[in-house]
Amino acid sequence: YLARRSQLLADHVGLGKSITALAAMTDKATLPALVVCQAHLPKQWKDYAGKFSPMASCHIIKTGKLYSLPAADIYVITYHKLNKWAEVLCKVIKSCVFDEIQELRHDCSKKYDAAVAIREKCGYAMGLSATPIFNYGGEIFNVLQVLCPGEIGTYHEFYREWCNGGGTHT
């Protein structure tokens, strides 16, 4: 992860994806880090950070209203708040973990645009998911574009080579 600067970790539920992400955050080059997660998971991430990275300070961004962020090693935010905070976070973080990255499978959303903007500014990105492809094989293109832009070719090249019929619903 550190050498490559991006990673998609897709594994079964309960096998340690979150702990693997926290382990990557032990390198000072990755801090401060941002964890983007679903609405029911910020407290779980803070608890994991306290248990598996006890020396790291953790702050949950609890509101969509901007405020002065306290200094922290790890910031946790939900996908729903990401768009409002993107500009601020771009100036602060060095790495980003997108938990349940399948949330970014559609490239026509504000959260997707915010994730791309943040990824462009930070040095490291990791995606975690037990289901990186939610409905259609083509959805993985958008997920990988966030993590490692351009590395799997263009949209048209990917669909031509990997998706039957070339559409998003194949």
Image (cartoon, helix red, strand yellow):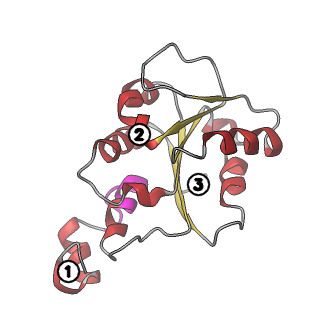
User: Is 24 in front, or is 102?
Assistant: 102
Query: Dot 1: few (<14), some (14–19), or many (≥20) neighbours within 10 Å?
Result: few
Q: Residue at x 67, y 44 (%)?
A: 45
Locate the N terminus by quadrant.
bottom right
Q: Which residue is mark 1?
A: 160
Picture coordinates of residue 139, whole percent (x, y): 33, 68
Q: Residue at x 54, y 28 (%)?
A: 62
Q: Which residue is mark 3?
A: 3
What amino acid is labelled 3 in the image?
Answer: Ala
Compared to residue 123, the image places residue 156 above or below, namely below
Q: Secondary structure at mark 2?
A: helix
Quick one: which residue is furthest to the bottom in this view? 164
In the rendered view, does 140 fall on the left or right side of 20? left
Locate the C terminus by quadrant.
bottom left
Q: How far is the residue under mark 1 from the one under mark 2?
A: 32 Å
What amino acid is labelled 1 in the image?
Answer: Arg
Picture coordinates of residue 103, whole percent (x, y): 41, 55
Sequence order check, earlier mark of 3 and 1 = 3
